[in-house]
Structures are given as structure tokens and as C-alpha cells.
Image: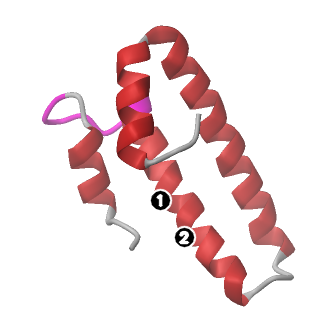
Amino acid sequence: MIKKKTETIKTLAIHDKDVGSAEVQVGLLTDKIKKLSEHFKKFKKDKHSTMGLTKSVNRRKKLLAYLKKKNTESYNKVIKQLNLRK
């Protein structure tokens, strides 16, 4: 099931008040992508949301590339925790 934002932030945060690190952003984008994927199971012809999904996937891809370059250990942790493919 799709997690709430606060749960995602708590599991991926680096410190207590962290809400904007790359790890948290990847987690929030992953939740948004899952939500949109569920939406498309009902509404296959929704082209406007398709654009939003594409933008979210590309943004997550860029953030993961940045994270892999800056902090490989954190990248591996996020990939494993969110169950994403490499």
C-alpha cells in the first residue's frame, strides 16, 4: 500500500528535521509515482497526468544519479529501502 508522506520522510531522513534531502525527495517522488500508476489502472486515457508521471520519473532519475555520484552508501540504502531497480 502507499505510505503517507510523514512515514516516508521519517524512514529516509538523515536527521530529525530533514525534509528536503535528496533521499527524502526520492522517497516522496516514489510515492507520487505509485499513486499515479494506480490512477492509470482506472483512467488509461488521462494524458495530462501522463505528463506529470513522466516528469516525476525523470526528476527521480536525476536525483538518484546525483545521490549515486555524491554518496554511494546512501544511494544503495535508498534503492534497497524503496525496492527500486538499479
Q: Position of residue 62 (x, y in %)?
A: 64, 29
Q: Residue furthest top?
A: 70
Q: Position of residue 68 (x, y in %)?
A: 52, 18
Q: Is residue 21 above or below residue 29?
A: above
Q: In which quarter of the view is residue 69 placed?
A: top right
Q: Is 20 covered by the magenta stretch?
A: yes
Task: Identify which amino acid the numbered label 1 is placed on.
Answer: Asp
Q: In which quarter of the view is residue 19 placed?
A: top left
Would you say the magenta stretch is mainly helix, strand or loop?
A: loop
Observer able to see residue 21 = no
Q: Position of residue 51 (x, y in %)?
A: 80, 59
Residue 33 falls left or right of residue 52: left
| Picture residue at 44% right of the left edge, 51% below the top | 28
Write down the residue under mark 1. Answer: 31
Q: Which residues are magenta?
A: 15-23
Mark 1 burial class by Cα count in 10 Å: few <14, some 14-19, many 20+: some
Q: Is 53 covered by the magenta stretch?
A: no
Task: Identify which amino acid the numbered label 2 is placed on.
Answer: Lys
Write down the residue under mark 2. Answer: 35
Q: Position of residue 8 (x, y in %)?
A: 31, 52
Q: Is residue 7 above or below residue 50?
A: above
| Picture residue at 86% right of the left edge, 82% below the top | 45
Q: Residue furthest left?
A: 16
Closer to us: 74 or 16: 74
Observer able to see residue 5 = yes
